[in-house]
Image (cartoon, helix red, strand yellow):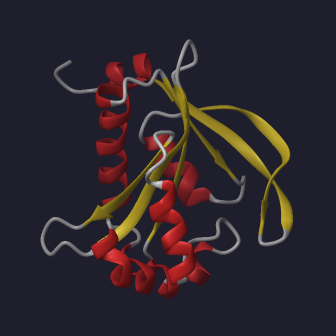
Amino acid sequence: MAADRQPFLAAMCASRRFHRPWLTTPVTDEAFDTLLSRAQDPQFEPMLVCRIEDGAIVGFINISQIVRGSFQSAYLGYGGVAAHAGHGYMREGLELVLAHAFTELRLHRLEANIQPGNHASIALVRGAGFVREGFSERYLKIGGRWRDHERWAIRVEQWRARRPGR
């Protein structure tokens, strides 16, 4: 991931407007260094979504706050690159991340918290089989403001039931 510093930062800088007000992405060397440092934590798995044809970075997906024991759960965060939005790359990337989470990491549940007005993000997780579980008022501070979020989740059983040829 360290070799992807410049293309990643350029893509995130170019996508700042696209992400506002939904999330804050790393756009500086310092923020990227923090991301690399977090990648050493076994409770955090950052992944890039890259286009197969040319390796272009089209987004990122993070599995974070991985809790083991009887919980076996984690949070999901992600962001697409504006120039590549609407082509299905994030959907394909999310499907791969779900397979990784439920097979390699052996998680039982993934949760994504999404602002109610972020229709593209809601469509992404809904299309991948996530179910809306609830609403969290003033859940997360983004851009200096506490923002409401819908709580979406998928369990391994739900993921398995959706897979073709299971």
Would residue 88 be seen by someone viewing this image from the given angle? no
Residue at 37% across / 23% down in the picture?
106
Comparing 67 with 11, the one in front is: 67
| 20 up-or-down from 130: above or below | below
12 lies left or right of 145: left
The x, y position of residue 17, in whole percent, is: 61, 83
140 lies left or right of 152: right
| 135 up-or-down from 67: above or below | below
The x, y position of residue 117, in whole percent, is: 71, 59
| 13 up-or-down from 23: above or below | below
Q: What is the quadrant of the N terminus in the image?
A: bottom left
Residue at 46% across / 40% down in the picture?
42
Comparing 77 with 135, the one in front is: 77
The x, y position of residue 86, in whole percent, is: 39, 68
Residue at 51% across / 21% down in the picture?
72
Q: Quadrant of residue 105?
A: top left
Q: What is the quadrant of the C terminus in the image?
A: top left
